[in-house]
Structure formats: C-alpha cells, structure tokens
Image: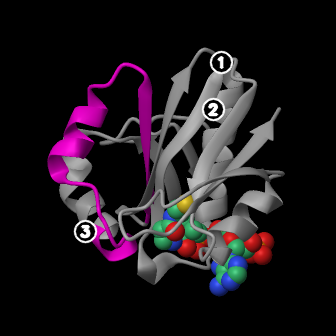
C-alpha cells in the first residue's frame, strides 16, 4: 500500500493496479456508463455534475489498470457521513474492488472526524448488504417505498 501522486491523476491511494482518485467532471462519461448499468433509476449527468460542486459532498473514482471501474459518493454534515452512491462496473464485480473502495471511504470519513456513517440499501440487494455487514453496518430502520419503483430502503449505520 502506498500513498503518492500519479502522472495524470492525483491519486489518493494505490495498491498495484488499483487506484483511487477524486471524481472530476472529465470522469463523468465513464461514471455514467457504470451508473446506467448498475441502477434501475440512474442519476443524470447533471446531477453528478451538481454533486461535484456541492461543498458537503465528496466523490471518489476507482481505477483498475487505468480504467474507471467504480465510484462512491458521500455527504458529510455535522460529523455524520451519508453514502449517496456506490457502484462497481459489472465486469469487475466480485474481485474485491468494492470492498477496497468502500473501506477507503470509511477511513476517509473517520479521518475527517465523522463519528458515524449511514446509507440506504434495497432489501433485495443481498450483495451490497453482505458488504456493509462485513464492515460492521447494522440495519437501523426502513424507509417505506423509498425507491421510485416502490421498493423500501433499509437504513444501515455504522458508528466508529
Ligand atoms: C455492491 C457492489 C458495489 C459490490 O462491489 P464488488 O466489487 O462486487 O464487491 P467485492 O467483490 O468487493 O465484494 C465485497 C463483499 O460483497 C459481498 N458480495 C460480493 N459479491 C457477492 C455475491 N455474488 N453474493 C453475495 N455477496 C457478495 C461479499 O460480502 C463480499 O465480501 P467477501 O468477498 O469477503 O465475501 C457491486 O455489486 C455493485 O456495483 N452493485 C450494483 C450497484 C449497487 O448495488 N450499489 C450499492 C447500492 S446500496
């Protein structure tokens, strides 16, 4: 594990060919492709763009062998972090990249003084729930019909 800057991207974290950087507007075409293949109601390009200028928001992109393979966003308000979005490219799932990116984001939130992290997840999204449980997240509530297709959301939280 090393922390240094790369040639093109100001990498925040590197482990071999896996790297993490701040998300920038020029990453959005690749991010949008992953978004559209990951979520039934994908965020729009303009929503991502407005999030990148939201002072309370932080967005990371993950690279593998120079290609963007995932991203994660969070909001930090009053010492609490909320994960807003998180996805890994379908062709790169199940390789441990999601765990690395998620773990990086949790450490980042902790380093910024946050005491807890929350997120919403679909009850049907067992993969994501398994990942969150492996980091110590617990289900703390349900938001009824949270998603546009009517599915509930489970609210999960981890306290550092
Ligand atoms: C959820 C997601 C980000 C996980 O990324 P990933 O790179 O595939 O995850 P990893 O390979 O790092 O696996 C991490 C953990 O997820 C769980 N997991 C991964 N694949 C799984 C599978 N097929 N079945 C069950 N659990 C699985 C496991 O707990 C795994 O840890 P383990 O390997 O130690 O058992 C990815 O599946 C994704 O982008 N899904 C679509 C978008 C999405 O659902 N985002 C989350 C919204 S809340």
Checking the image for residue 108, the label placed there is: 2
From where the camera sits, is residue 16 visible?
A: no
Of residue 12 and residue 39, the one placed in the foreground of this image is 39
Label whose residue precedes the other's in the sequence (3 or 2): 3
Classify 142 as above or below 106. Answer: below
Label 2 Cα neighbours within 10 Å, binned few <14 / some 14-19 / many ≥20: few
Residues at marks 2 and 1, CA–CA distance in whole angstroms:
12 Å
Name the residue located 64 percent from the left edge and 25 percent from the top edge: 80
Q: State the count of labels.
A: 3
From where the camera sits, is residue 45 visible?
A: yes
The colour scheme used to paint the residues is: one colour
Circles 3 and 2: CB atoms closer than 8 Å? no
Q: What residue would you read off at disc 3?
A: 33
Name the residue located 54 percent from the left edge and 25 percent from the top edge: 76
Relative horizontal placement of residue 96, taking residue 6 as reference (left or right): right
The mark lying in front, picked from 2 and 1, is 1
Q: Which residues are magenta?
A: 36-64
**Picture coordinates of residue 28 (x, y %)?**
22, 52
């Amino acid at each position: 594990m090393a922390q240094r800057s790369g040639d093109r991207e100001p990498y925040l974290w590197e482990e071999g060919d896996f790297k993490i950087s701040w998300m920038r507007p020029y990453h959005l075409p690749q991010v949008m492709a992953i978004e559209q293949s990951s979520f039934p109601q994908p965020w729009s390009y303009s929503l991502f763009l407005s999030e990148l200028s939201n002072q309370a928001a932080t967005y990371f992109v993950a690279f593998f062998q120079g290609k963007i393979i995932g991203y994660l966003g969070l909001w930090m308000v009053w010492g609490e972090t909320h994960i807003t979005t998180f996805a890994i490219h379908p062709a790169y799932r199940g390789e441990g990249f999601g765990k690395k990116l998620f773990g990086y984001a949790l450490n980042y939130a902790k380093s910024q003084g946050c005491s807890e992290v929350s997120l919403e997840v679909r009850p049907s999204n067992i993969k994501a729930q398994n990942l969150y449980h492996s980091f110590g997240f617990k289900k703390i509530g349900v938001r009824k019909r949270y998603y546009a297709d009517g599915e509930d959301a489970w609210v999960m939280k981890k306290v550092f």
